[in-house]
Image (cartoon, helix red, strand yellow):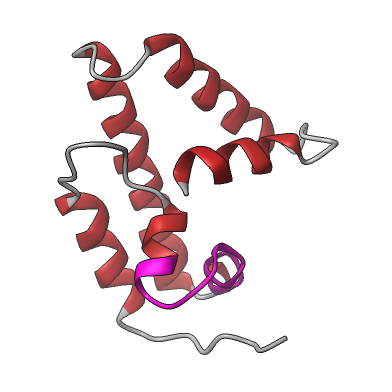
């Protein structure tokens, strides 16, 4: 398995991708960003060791969360499903996702 090479332009490109996302169907995701840039989600997660990338990753995640919430409020996305995603995401952040099931759900939804 190859180790992906970190590109210093990734933080700026990721921020731009999430800020300018404008597809009619779907939502911005780290999976979509990774694929569009020739990486995997695993690659992106490994790049979080770089300070600038980590800051951009956190900002992109907030933009993504706002996007989901805004679209749920406008009834373009199912509010219950968005609530489920954000609640489960919080559990993962706290390390409570013991069986890895959320990762599968988010990958299917984001990808």
Residue ID at (54%, 18%): 84
Q: Position of residue 12 (x, y in %)?
A: 25, 71
- Of residues 106 and 96, which is closer to you in this image? 106
Residue at figure coordinates x 43%, y 66% from the top left: 34
Furthest toward the right, the residue is 98
Report if residue 46 lies within the magenta region: yes
Report if residue 45 lies within the magenta region: yes
Residue 98 drawn above or below residue 35: above
Asked if 48 appears above or below 101 in the picture, the reply is below
Asked which quadrant contains residue 13, the reply is bottom left
Coordinates of residue 10 in the picture (x, y in percent): 35, 76
Q: Name the magenta segment's main secondary structure.
A: helix
Query: Residue, x 37% and y 62% (percent of image)?
Result: 33
Q: Along the horizontal axis of the image, is 84 left or right of 59?
A: right
Of 111 and 6, nearer the camera is 111
Q: How many marks?
A: 0
At horizontal 29% and vertical 42% (from top left) the residue drawn is: 63
Q: Is residue 2 left or right of residue 27?
A: right
Write the start and end of the magenta stretch as one range: 35-47
Residue 65 location, x and y as percent? Answer: 37, 34
- Quadrant housing residue 64: top left
Q: Which corner quadrant holds the N terminus?
A: bottom right
């Amino acid at each position: 398995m190859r180790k992906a090479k970190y590109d210093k332009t990734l933080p700026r490109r990721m921020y731009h991708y999430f800020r300018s996302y404008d597809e009619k169907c779907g939502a911005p995701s780290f999976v979509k960003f990774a694929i569009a840039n020739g990486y995997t989600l695993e690659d992106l997660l490994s790049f979080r060791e770089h300070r600038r990338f980590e800051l951009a990753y956190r900002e992109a995640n907030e933009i993504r969360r706002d996007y989901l919430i805004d679209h749920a409020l406008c009834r373009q996305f199912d509010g219950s499903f968005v609530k489920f995603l954000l609640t489960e995401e919080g559990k993962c952040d706290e390390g409570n996702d013991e069986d890895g099931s959320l990762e599968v759900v988010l990958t299917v939804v984001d990808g």
